[in-house]
Image: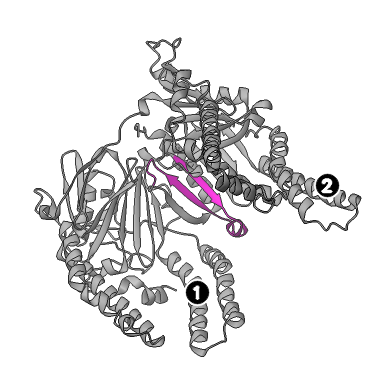
Amino acid sequence: MDLRMKRRDPGGHQAGPMRTVTDADGARLDGPGARGAGAVLRPPRNRVDRRAVPVWTIELLLLTVPVAAGAVAAYWIFTSRPVWLGVLTGGFAVLLLGLAVHTPRAHHRLNRWEVTGEAVYTRTGWFTHVWRVAPMSRIQTVDTERGPVKRLFGLADVTVTTASAAGAIKIEALDHELAAELAERLTAMTQATPGDAT
Amino acid sequence: MIAWRPLHRRSLAASAAMSTAIVVPVVAVLIRVLPRDWTAPVRAGVIAGAAVLVVAGVLVFDLLRLRTTAWRLTGERLELRSGIVFREHRSVPRDRIRSVDLTADPVRRALGLTVVKIGTGEHTSGERTMLTLDPLSRRDAEELRGVLLWQAGQEHGGDDPSRDAPLAVLDWSWLRLAPLTVWTVAGGALIAGIAYKPLDALGVDLVESGAAAQLWEGVTTRPWPVIPLLLAVNVLVGLTGAVVTFATAWGRYRLEREPGRLRLSRGLLTARSLTLEERRLRGPGLGSHGRSGPGSHGHRGLRPHPGAAMTRRLRATVVSTAFLAAVAAAAARSWSLPPPWSWSWAVPVLALPVTLWLAADAARGLGHALGERHLVTRAGAIVRRTVALDRGGVVGWTVSESYFQRRLGLITVSATTAAGDGHYDVLDVGAEEGLDLAARAVPGLLGPFLRTPGPLRDGLGGELLDPFSERHGV
């Protein structure tokens, strides 16, 4: 598994003399700034649960299969079925399904999270990489959420909100017991960290 | 262990009462739609069945909701479990609670129920940001309000600032200001417009019934008395509406100061009461420095962004121009459009100098600086917007790097804050510089997650306390 991940890693593009740091998984996850001598955002420590891949795949298929099927049906019923449009429609459907199968794997490889005594830190994104940090002292609510598919696989999401409308941090697809424990700890830590009047 | 508490069961009665709002239109439509050759008992049976089905559906949903929702208040936090399909467990530390909002519409009021919304002062108005307990008994709600904001009161307890006199009460002479809205003029016509569809469903067709035709005839034959009369009726309806709306919304308005908090109550029919912690009221730490013209890109003190930001904008402009021209050319060819349109592909190409100039200006406009108290960021082509954000008001960082930015060594650093837009961005800054800026702007926040590449690196980086890394390691 490690070898395949190394080969497929989208971070491995060759753009100049990059100094990427390899972490334990072999996935090159170092953040921006990796090419210079300055500081780099290091990847958060923890990966999401292995079960996230089937869960996300099912969730995406539930979304994309009807759309793809609708497109093909519309082509078949409402048009005079020209070849070029058929190729286009077929390509669209295959692309959707391909994304539904591939994206969860990419996300599982790339999404990371970490909770320290002072902050919550996550890394998400495949095409656009996003790192988020929120300090304990500014955390206002801690939520856990379980959709139907996630419940089937025993997973849960944890969302942490701050005073900002743009500041919610979501840690997706954790084992539900771990999620409950994490939420519990986060609330306790938030409680212990004096808040400020924001 | 403090036990989980359910919502109030009388909610079922409220839901049943509310469901008439669905039953009435359903029955009305059924009366219209059912075939007339059915016998009266059959029609009555079908209609009654539909009504029962609607009420039962609403009740079952509410019952499920009540059964799956539970809340509890512990010494440290308020917790809420909810969701029939999507299970949710929310928890708010008590010292983060900023406001408690009690709302009772007439139905719930009659049943002695109150909806409690607990806010943490988040900026958006979305439901997600609030914990909603729908409903509690009025006594429980008042008690919860008192308990939740008690701490705040204690801290200010020493000199009890006169709880007797309210800061403001409703002065009914304010009512004369109520009609000063556009609705007074538009009111009557608006109501007629809104009422048209439901009346149509009920079989009252204003247009076909001849009422409209008669009215029109009246207007054309005797315009003098009819038109002023119509206008007068319109204004009268609008006026009544405005006054009634004002009275129901603001009747019994009172603003009171309780120790350490403000309490606002209002509403004749739906009683609302909002309590805020006084010490949380403060202005946002945000300043928007004047919008300056195109000549001001040499603003002193702001660091310009790397040339790659310029490259990125110019490249994007050229690529999108080529794409637009190609699409226009393809369209002109495939539909063989006549001459003026067949040249449409030239438009984006001819505009290229202007768009390139705009792109370059946007790149030159980028800048940032770190002051003693503020983080300053500037962006925009032609109209430049400079924002100075109080460093103490930064509640988190979002660093993003798109595929294209990655290739150019750029990142966007976004400071999240409670003020204004919720986040302020430093666009397309050099990766190292941006991270350094964020690390210095709020010491100790982003810093622990940075590591310097080179011999000092320890592979895993960081010697931070991480309660989860041992057991659930990478």
Say if B269 sits above or below B308 in the image: above
x and y percentages locating residue B320 in the rendered image: 29, 73
Amino acid carrying label 2: it is Ala
Q: Separation of disc 2 and disc 1 at Cα?
A: 47 Å
Seen in the picture, residue B107 relative to B420 is either above or below; the reply is: above
Q: Which span is picked out in magenta?
A: A141-165
**Residue at x-position 40% and y-position 34%:** A192
Above or below, B156 relative to A17? above
Q: Which residue is drawn at 21% across and 45% down?
A: B375
Rendered image quadrant of residue B417: top left
**Residue B277: x, y in percent?**
41, 26
Q: Nearer the viewer, mark 2 or mark 1?
A: 2
Which residue, as the protein is rendered here, is positioned at the far front?
Answer: B221
Residue behind mark 2: B48
Image location of residue B274, percent across then percent down:
48, 27
The label shown at residue A176 is: none
Residue B254 covered by magenta stretch? no
Query: What quarter of the picture does the N terminus of chain A occupy?
Result: bottom left
Secondary structure found at label 1 = helix
